[in-house]
Amino acid sequence: MTNAVASLVLVLAALAAPACRREAPEETETQTAVAVAVAPAARNTIREVIAASGVVTPAPGAELVVTAPEAARIAEMPKAEGDRVRAGDLLVRFDIPSLAKETAASRAEVEQVQARLENAKAAAARVKGLFERGIAAMKEVEDAERDLRDAEAALSRAQSASRAAETLAGRAEARARFAGIIAKRWHNPGDLVEPGQSDPILRVIDPSRLEVAAAVPVDAVTRIVVGGAARVI
């Protein structure tokens, strides 16, 4: 029994010997200088970047959607999609027969009333001269002056109607209200268009006045700095 225990001890000693003789890792020393980038310390504000998805839209007053004032045909559209425009540039000219007829009729009415007024003035002057010479009666003078007043009132009404017709005729042209670009063009010259937003013709925007509507987490609202820079991707 004693010999067996001795043999077992020898076997264990033999197995443990290689582990005891394991060599330590080799260490190497060098005198070569290692380049290290340095920078002076500076105080600054650390800003957090908040990512959010949003929609880019024109600011109020920076968008113009042209529509027809009434059913019409497009006579002219000099600007193409992507073109730049200046304030006052012609965007669309409509062919609206009803407006043209009203304008022509109002001008003709003004001309007729002006001729009537000239005749009334001449008649009043003639009757007044006759009255001064004792040939015409006072009633004739009063009638002539009344005709003159009626002609003057008729001319005022005709001129007002003509100005209203000219204003309506001005609706046959759509011009740019501000400098911008043609963002969208839905129609071409010769197309028949209907009035209202359901049938738009052109969309003009001012690219210098755009807004971004984005949704951010509630817990990030307090970390948003008013006037801070934003990057739109």
Image (cartoon, helix red, strand yellow):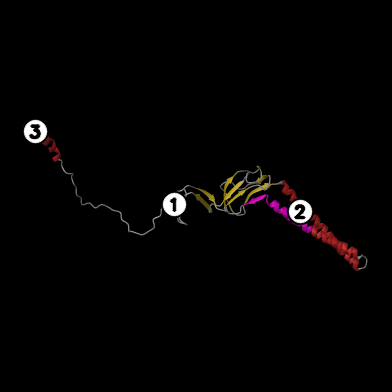
Q: Give the CA separation, mark 2 to mark 3.
A: 136 Å
The furthest residue to the left: 3
Left/right of residue 167 with respect to residue 40 in the rendered view: right
Q: Secondary structure at mark 2?
A: helix
Q: Which residue shows up at 73% across the image and 49% down it?
A: 100
Of badges 1 and 3, the one in the foreground is 3
Of badges 2 and 3, the one in the foreground is 3
Residue 190 % position (x, y): 66, 42
Residue 226 % position (x, y): 47, 57
The residue segment tinted magenta is: 155-175
Which residue does the numbered mark 3 point to in the structure image?
5
Q: Secondary structure at mark 1?
A: helix
Q: Earlier in the sequence, mark 2 or mark 3?
A: 3
Is residue 158 on the magenta stretch?
yes
Q: Secondary structure at mark 3?
A: helix
Report the predominant secondary structure element of the magenta stretch.
helix
The furthest residue to the right: 135
Depth check: give the residue in front, 9 or 158. Answer: 9
Left/right of residue 148 with respect to residue 57 in the rendered view: right
Is residue 163 on the magenta stretch?
yes
Which residue does the numbered mark 2 point to in the structure image?
107
For badge 1, the amino acid type reads: Ala
Q: Give the CA separation, mark 1 to mark 3.
A: 75 Å
Which residue does the numbered mark 1 point to in the structure image?
220
Q: How many marks?
A: 3
